[in-house]
Amino acid sequence: MKNQKSTQLFKNAQKVIPGGVNSPVRAFKSVAADPIFIQKAKGPYLYDEDGNRYIDYCLSWGPMILGHANIFVLSGVEKAMSKGTSYGIPTVGETQLAEMIVSAFASIDEVRLVSSGTEAVMTAIRLARGATGRDKVIKFIGGYHGHVDHMLVSAGSGLMTLGSPSSPGVPADFAKHTLLAPYNNPEAVMELFKEYADQIAAVIVEPIAGNMGTVLPKPFFLNELRTLCNQHKSILIFDEV
Ligand SMILES: Cc1ncc(COP(=O)(O)O)c(C=O)c1O
């Protein structure tokens, strides 16, 4: 397969973008390759700058569930854009979107719309800490929850390519509030709750662990987390970004 153009484009990108990519999940180091640069996409296919065509199983990590450049989506976006692209003050569309999300999920009562997964995680953890008055958060080894400081501890995804358990630049004072447990191991979580009884604000988990190779939860693992959090009045955060 040809990839000379992508390789050259990656070299150019590295001159002006740290590491050449804007998210660790776009770095290809863990698969010993240079990232491919996409030129366009249509339906189920991605086309790169070298003219290769790929079936897209990633779908931009979820949102392209209707396929790329879907005609209904494009015409909806075009209609909205013709009214201007951003106002910086509220619009009725935000409430309508929130209402649709709330009515689609029995477990969701209210929605806060944010721009990135990192921001969502940061907000959820701040809320959990504020509501419980506690500092510590349990995360699972290999789970990735964005580049917020205290979550860059044993994070999976592209961060594994750094070859260190946590990112340089994360103060030890922040990381010390992050407790680690192996995924699918409720006993380890139970032990942490025993040791840090009233200090745990939240448990954060990728319900299906996508950032360490798509690992499914064992039967009842998530139920046990729910029970433990209820028992200890901690918040359970499902990060499904
Ligand atoms: C589970 C999970 N949480 C959070 C994030 C961070 O999202 P973002 O890159 O939009 O900040 C990611 C990104 O890959 C993710 O997979």
Image (cartoon, rainbow, N blue to C red):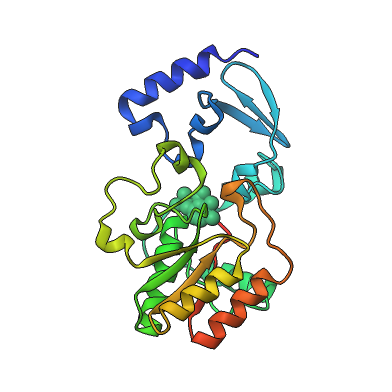
Does the image show residue 119? yes
Looking at the image, residue 19 lies above or below residue 81:
above
The percent position of residue 24, horizontal first and vertical second, equals 45, 40
Give the side of residue 1 with respect to residue 170, left or right: right
Q: In which quadrant will I find the C terminus? A: bottom right
The percent position of residue 128, horizontal first and vertical second, equals 42, 77
Does the image show residue 84? no
The percent position of residue 73, horizontal first and vertical second, equals 66, 48
Q: Quadrant of residue 98?
A: bottom right
| Marker count (numbered) | 0
Looking at the image, residue 147 lies above or below residue 161:
below
**Residue appearing at x 64%, y 76% in the figure:** 224
Seen from the viewer's position, the closer of residues 178 and 89 is: 178
Looking at the image, residue 132 lies above or below residue 121:
below
Give the side of residue 241 with respect to residue 218, left or right: left
Looking at the image, residue 178 lies above or below residue 48:
below
Q: In which quadrant will I find the N terminus? A: top right
Seen from the viewer's position, the closer of residues 88 and 204 is: 204
Seen from the viewer's position, the closer of residues 115 and 170 is: 170
The percent position of residue 52, horizontal first and vertical second, equals 66, 19
**Residue appearing at x 59%, y 71% in the figure:** 187
**Residue appearing at x 74%, y 67% in the figure:** 219
Give the side of residue 224 with respect to residue 180, left or right: right
Seen from the viewer's position, the closer of residues 191 and 206 is: 191
**Residue appearing at x 39%, y 42% in the figure:** 164
